C-alpha cells in the first residue's frame, strides 16, 4: 500500500467522541477548501459505523451547504432514523465552527436475492494503455505548475486515468458532454481495512473528482484549473448496485444532460472492468462564468 493511500485511509478513519458523534480531520483540496468527496466519504463512514455489519450501503443523498475549512476538524452527528427488518436509514450532519456544512441521508440493506438486469458497459480502452495523471498533467505547458502539483498531490492516493483529454487539457471549443475515467486506489486494500464499507466510501470519495467535467466539455471550458469557471458541488446522490473493489479498475462513464441558471448536472454509471454495473451517480453543481466587470 502506498503512503498516500495510507494517508487517505487515515483521513477517513474517524474518531468517535460520543455515541453517534464522530470527528474527522480535514485537508486542503485543489482549491483552498475541503474537498467535497472527503466530506461525503467521512459522513458515510460515520453512518456506517452505527449500522450492523451485515447491512451494506445501497444509496446516499447529500447536500453541500457551506464551504469547508481545511484548517479545522469536522464533527459528524448521526441520527438513527430507522432500523427495519431489511433496511437501515441514517441521517448525518457535518458541522464546522458551529454551523452545518453538509447533510447526508444513507440507506443500508441486508443481502437479498431478486430480479437482476443492467444496461451494458459502454466501449472503453484498456486502462493500462492510458497515460497516468502525472504523465498527462506534466505535459500541459499552459497550466500553472502550482496547479499541477496541487492536482497531483490531491490525487496521489488514486490512480485516475482519463480516456480522452480532460477539460483543462483541451478547451476553447465545445465538445460532446461525455467523459470517461478509469480509477482505482494506488495500492491494494487488505487485512483489517478490507471491508465492504471502505470500498463504498472510497468510491464516494472519488465520485466527486470528475463528475462535472462533462458540463465543462459541453461549453469548451477548462474549469477551475484554468480559471474560466467558478463553482462548487450542490448535491450528490449515489446508488450502490453490486459489490465491487475500489482497488480494482472501475470505469466512470459520465455525461451532462443539462446546464442552466448557473447550475450544471452530471450523471454517471460506474462499471467493474468485467462489465458489471456497480454504481449510479448524479450530481448538480454551481457552474458560473466569472464576471468581467
Image (tube, rainbow, N blue to C red):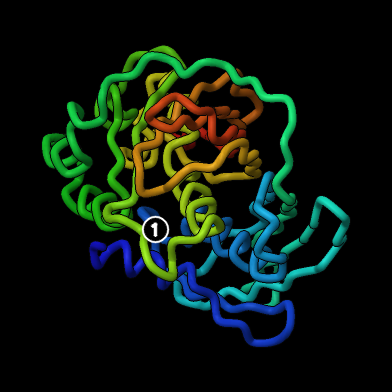
10 Å neighbourhood of mark 1: few (<14), some, or many (≥20)? some
Q: Position of residue 88 (x, y in %)?
A: 80, 57
Q: Position of residue 33 (x, y in %)?
A: 46, 61
Can you name the residue that lies furthest to the front here?
113
Q: Is residue 173 above or below residue 42?
A: above
Pick the front one: 94 or 197: 197
Q: Which residue shows up at 53% across the image and 55% down it? A: 196
Q: Which residue shows up at 59% across the image and 64% down it? A: 45
Q: Which residue shows up at 54% across the image and 45% down it? A: 232
Q: Quadrant of the N terminus?
A: bottom left
Q: Position of residue 36 (x, y in %)?
A: 52, 54
Task: Find residue 164 and report its image quarter.
Answer: top left
Residue 150 in view here: no
Badge 1 marks a residue whose secondary structure is loop
Q: Is residue 164 above or below residue 65?
A: above
Task: Find residue 2 and report its image quarter.
Answer: bottom left
In this rendering, would 62 be left or right of 45? right
Pick the front one: 210 or 293: 210
Task: Find residue 139 and report its image quarter.
Answer: top left
Task: Please tell me how many numbered marks the rendered image carries.
Answer: 1
Pick the front one: 210 or 206: 206
Q: Is residue 278 above or below residue 16?
A: above
Q: Which residue shows up at 64% across the image and 87% down it? A: 17
Residue 49 in view here: yes
Q: Position of residue 215 (x, y in %)?
A: 49, 25
Residue hosting label 1 = 29
Amino acid at each position: 500500500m502506498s503512503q498516500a493511500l495510507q494517508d487517505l485511509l487515515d483521513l477517513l478513519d474517524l474518531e468517535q467522541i460520543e455515541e453517534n458523534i464522530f470527528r474527522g480531520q480535514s485537508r486542503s483540496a485543489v482549491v483552498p477548501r475541503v474537498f467535497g468527496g472527503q466530506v461525503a466519504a467521512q459522513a458515510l463512514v460515520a453512518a456506517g459505523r452505527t449500522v450492523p455489519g451485515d447491512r451494506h450501503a445501497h444509496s446516499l443523498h447529500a447536500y453541500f451547504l457551506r464551504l469547508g475549512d481545511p484548517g479545522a476538524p469536522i464533527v459528524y452527528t448521526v441520527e438513527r432514523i430507522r432500523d427495519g427488518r431489511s433496511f437501515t436509514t441514517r441521517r448525518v450532519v457535518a458541522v464546522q465552527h458551529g454551523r452545518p456544512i453538509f447533510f447526508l441521508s444513507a440507506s443500508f440493506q441486508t443481502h437479498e436475492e431478486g430480479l437482476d438486469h443492467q444496461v451494458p458497459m459502454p466501449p472503453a480502452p484498456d486502462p493500462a494503455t492510458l497515460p497516468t495523471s502525472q504523465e498527462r498533467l506534466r505535459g500541459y505547458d499552459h497550466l500553472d505548475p502550482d496547479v499541477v502539483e496541487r492536482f497531483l498531490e490531491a490525487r496521489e492516493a488514486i490512480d485516475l486515468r482519463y480516456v480522452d483529454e480532460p477539460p483543462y487539457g483541451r478547451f476553447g471549443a465545445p465538445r460532446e458532454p461525455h467523459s470517461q475515467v478509469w480509477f482505482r486506489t494506488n495500492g491494494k486494500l487488505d487485512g483489517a481495512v478490507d471491508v465492504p464499507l471502505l470500498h463504498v466510501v472510497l468510491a464516494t470519495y472519488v465520485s466527486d473528482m470528475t463528475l462535472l467535467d462533462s458540463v465543462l466539455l459541453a461549453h469548451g471550458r477548462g474549469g477551475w484549473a484554468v480559471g474560466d469557471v467558478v463553482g462548487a458541488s450542490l448535491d450528490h446522490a449515489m446508488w450502490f448496485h453490486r459489490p465491487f473493489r475500489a482497488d480494482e479498475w472501475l470505469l466512470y462513464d459520465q455525461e451532462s444532460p443539462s446546464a442552466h441558471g448557473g447550475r450544471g448536472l452530471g450523471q454517471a454509471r460506474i462499471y467493474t472492468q468485467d462489465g458489471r454495473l456497480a454504481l449510479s451517480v448524479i450530481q448538480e453543481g454551481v457552474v458560473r462564468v466569472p464576471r468581467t466587470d
